[in-house]
Image (cartoon, rainbow, N blue to C red):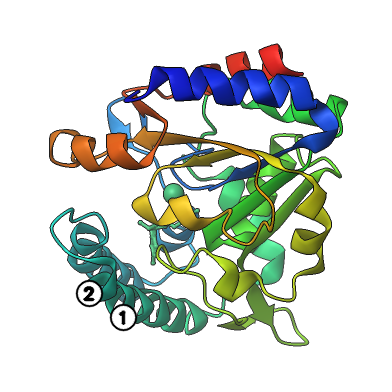
């Protein structure tokens, strides 16, 4: 924390305002899901599809090449957001086109998720249970694949009615085969009002003026920008990768930065105090 007093003040103010004023806005991949497990990288919702048995060897190779080319750009602290944005659109567009060529069946999604190595961060049950119990809305805003991430939280038995997701959703034809992804395209650096306009759910949240924001990317910082009247916001960031190079920027941007922490303990502790 760069400003522990600010953090304390925000937490106290949120407790005072109470649960009826609180909402949680969270990223999904590498924030609610784990970055590493058993010394290996855990998959993102896209990676779950990329690595699955329904993708041809040639498709797998092309998707991996895209990842190796664009991921270093995504997390490069020396490039501006303006530089990154068109390149991210390029990555997502090319990956979605490749996925749409693979004849992925809607009916296979649940099995693909079951067979993957994905893991949610330790403490996810407590996080979702606490929010559900106190009727606090949890808004998951993800540049990943909505169908996949919804299946992950469904299989983890935490897809409660207070959880709402905005993400990239697959479009299937009448026989249940993936043909394209629906608009608008959400990538790492347009997670803001520009893609939320018109989503009724987000408007409903305008009275929830205490916000806990969870993310792992510099692009996640704008996820609450559409909320009209923010009284108190606490931004908690997981710094997963390129830690030394990115620490300073993360400390400037997030109120709390978590390193080498595959748990949700910090946010659970704060919620236990507030709720
Ligand atoms: O849920 P979240 O917004 O974090 O999802 C986006 C993440 O998915 C990005 O951080 C990016 O690294 C990853 N990604 C991927 N394969 C793609 C596109 C994005 O693994 N084709
Ligand atoms: Mg993420």
Looking at the image, is 109 positioned above or below residue 37?
below
Q: Are marks 2 and 1 in contact (CB under 8 Å)?
A: yes
Closest to the observer: 92 or 173? 92
Q: Quadrant of ligand 1?
A: bottom left
Q: Is residue 139 visible?
A: yes
Closest to the observer: 124 or 248? 248
Residue 96 percent coordinates (x, y):
46, 78
Q: Secondary structure at mark 2?
A: helix
Image quadrant where residue 170 sits: bottom right
Q: Residues within 10 Å of mark 1 (few under 14, many from 20)?
A: few
Residue in the picture at 71% in, 18% down? 274
Q: Secondary structure at mark 1?
A: helix
Q: Which residue is mark 2?
A: 83
Closest to the observer: 230 or 179? 230
Horizontally, residue 177 falls left or right of residue 258, namely right
Residue in the picture at 69% in, 14% down? 272
Q: Residues within 10 Å of mark 2 (few under 14, many from 20)?
A: few
Q: Which residue is mark 1?
A: 86
Residue 204 percent coordinates (x, y):
83, 57
Residue in the picture at 73% in, 78% down? 176
**What label does residue 252 carry, if any?**
none
Image quadrant where residue 104 sits: bottom right
Residue 114 percent coordinates (x, y):
60, 44
Which quadrant: the N terminus? top left
Count of number-bearing discs? 2
Looking at the image, is 75 positioned above or below residue 86?
above
Residue 169 percent coordinates (x, y):
63, 71
Which quadrant: the C terminus? top right
Looking at the image, is 65 positioned above or below residue 117?
below
Looking at the image, is 27 positioned above or below residue 192?
above
Q: Is mark 2 within 8 Å of ligand 1?
A: no
Q: Is residue 48 visible?
A: no
């Amino acid at each position: 924390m760069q400003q522990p007093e600010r953090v304390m003040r925000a937490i106290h103010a949120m407790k005072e305002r109470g649960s009826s004023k609180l909402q949680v806005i969270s990223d999904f991949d590498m924030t609610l899901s784990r970055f590493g497990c058993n010394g290996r990288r855990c998959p993102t919702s896209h990676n779950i599809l990329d690595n699955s048995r329904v993708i041809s060897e040639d498709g797998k190779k092309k998707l991996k090449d895209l990842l190796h080319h664009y991921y270093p750009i995504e997390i490069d602290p020396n490039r501006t957001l303006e530089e990154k944005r068109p390149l991210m659109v390029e990555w997502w567009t090319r990956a979605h086109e490749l996925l749409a060529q693979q004849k992925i069946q809607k009916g296979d999604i649940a099995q693909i998720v079951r067979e993957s190595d994905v893991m949610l961060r330790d403490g996810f049950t407590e996080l979702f249970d606490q929010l559900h119990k106190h009727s606090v809305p949890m808004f998951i805003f993800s540049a990943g694949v909505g169908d996949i991430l919804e299946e992950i939280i469904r299989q983890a038995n935490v897809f409660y009615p207070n959880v709402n997701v905005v993400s990239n959703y697959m479009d299937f034809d009448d026989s249940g085969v993936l043909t394209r992804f629906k608009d608008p395209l959400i990538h790492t650096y347009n997670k803001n009002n520009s893609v939320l306009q018109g989503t009724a759910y987000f408007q409903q949240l305008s009275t929830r003026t205490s916000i806990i924001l969870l993310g792992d990317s510099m692009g996640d910082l704008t996820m609450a920008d559409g909320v009209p009247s923010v009284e108190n916001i606490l931004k908690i960031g997981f710094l997963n990768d390129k830690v030394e190079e990115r620490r300073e920027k993360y400390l400037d941007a997030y109120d709390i930065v978590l390193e080498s922490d595959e748990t949700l303990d910090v946010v659970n502790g704060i919620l236990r105090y507030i709720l």
